[in-house]
Amino acid sequence: MASLKEIRERKASVASTRQITSAMKMVSAAKLKKAQDAIVRFRPYADKLKEILASVGDSIKDDEDNKYSMQREKERILLVLITSNRGLCGAFNSNAIKAVIQRALTEYGTQMMAKQVDFISIGKKGNDFLRKKGYHVIMDESGVFDDLTFERVSSLASMIMERFTSGEYDHVDLIYNQFKNAGTQILTEEQFLPIEVEKLAAGHKMTSNIDYIFEPSKEYIVQELIPRSLRLQFYKAILDSHAAEHGARMTAMHKATDNATELLKELSLQFNKARQASITNEILEIVSGAEALKG
């Protein structure tokens, strides 16, 4: 059994840890509220824009000049990994990292062998891992979370779109955690470019028969809406990941605080037992000494 001093020191250490995790939980809860409000307010707008694009899906499909839905041979691949800048959020980062590596090695194994797969990392944790393992990271955009605005994210999305339309990349995927609630994050892997017209229309079957009046023309609106929709989709993915991160961290810190509380109870019990045993031994020594003096 550990000594009283060792148990006392361990109790102090656990109590200090519990104080830190409890504080981090409260900080994450406050940040989660702001991030959750942002993604909840943004989703209806992004979904409505997708709905409108779905309703003009035929125009997208038939428009030969639509450079964002151009299907090409998958030779050059770009994978965009969205993680967080900080840890202590459970499996939030590791799940996304495992998913992007799995996708690169299985879905694009041939391209990986030919060194035709590049990565963009949004989040320090993902960037550190990919670079440490020797993957080709062309850009680290971890600073996005320091200034999370649509203008900042839109410029990054526009750069990716330009690299696709110029033919530098034939396929672009996003890997991130989608926010559902504080305790649940959905690992999401979705195709960013080229646009999958059939899937877009299939996801909004209920609105496909609505007869819209387009001004100035359906074709013009399509050309304007597609780039805007792509930038919004990219921004929504980052907002989702940002909210999911704080939810995951709040949950992780809540569990850590509960575990520390349980451990303190066990250590208190051990301390009391050890102290009782120590007192008992001292009484026995006194009684034995007294008996020896009598003899």
Image (spheres, rainbow, N blue to C red):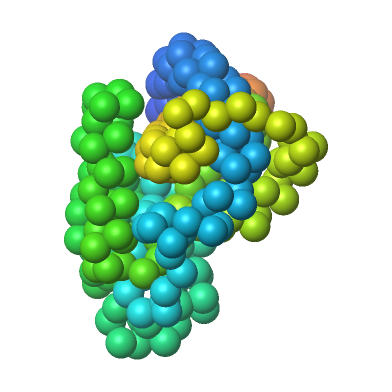
Image position, residue 70 (x, y; %): 43, 64
Whether residue 8 is visible, yes or no, is no
Residue 115 shows in the view: yes
Q: Position of residue 74 (x, y in %)?
A: 42, 77
**Count of picture labels:** 0
Between residue 173 and residue 221, name the one nearer to us: 221
- 177, 169: nearer the viewer: 169
Residue, x 40% and y 42% (percent of image)?
Answer: 223
Image position of 249 with respect to 164: above or below? above
Q: Quadrant of the N terminus?
A: top right
Q: Quadrant of residue 108?
A: bottom left
| Residue occupying the point 23% across, 48% down | 159
Quadrant location of the C terminus in the rendered image:
top right
Q: Position of residue 181 (x, y in %)?
A: 64, 27
Determine the residue positioned at 64% across, 57% down: 198
Q: Residue at position x 42%, y 38% from top?
A: 220
Residue with the most extreme front position: 216
Q: Is residue 29 above or below residue 233?
A: above
**Location of residue 147 (image quadrant):** top left
Query: Taking 55 as reference, is 22 above or below it?
Result: above
Residue 196 left/right relative to 81: right
The image position of residue 155, as x and y in percent, is: 24, 37
Near-viewer residue (123 or 160)? 160
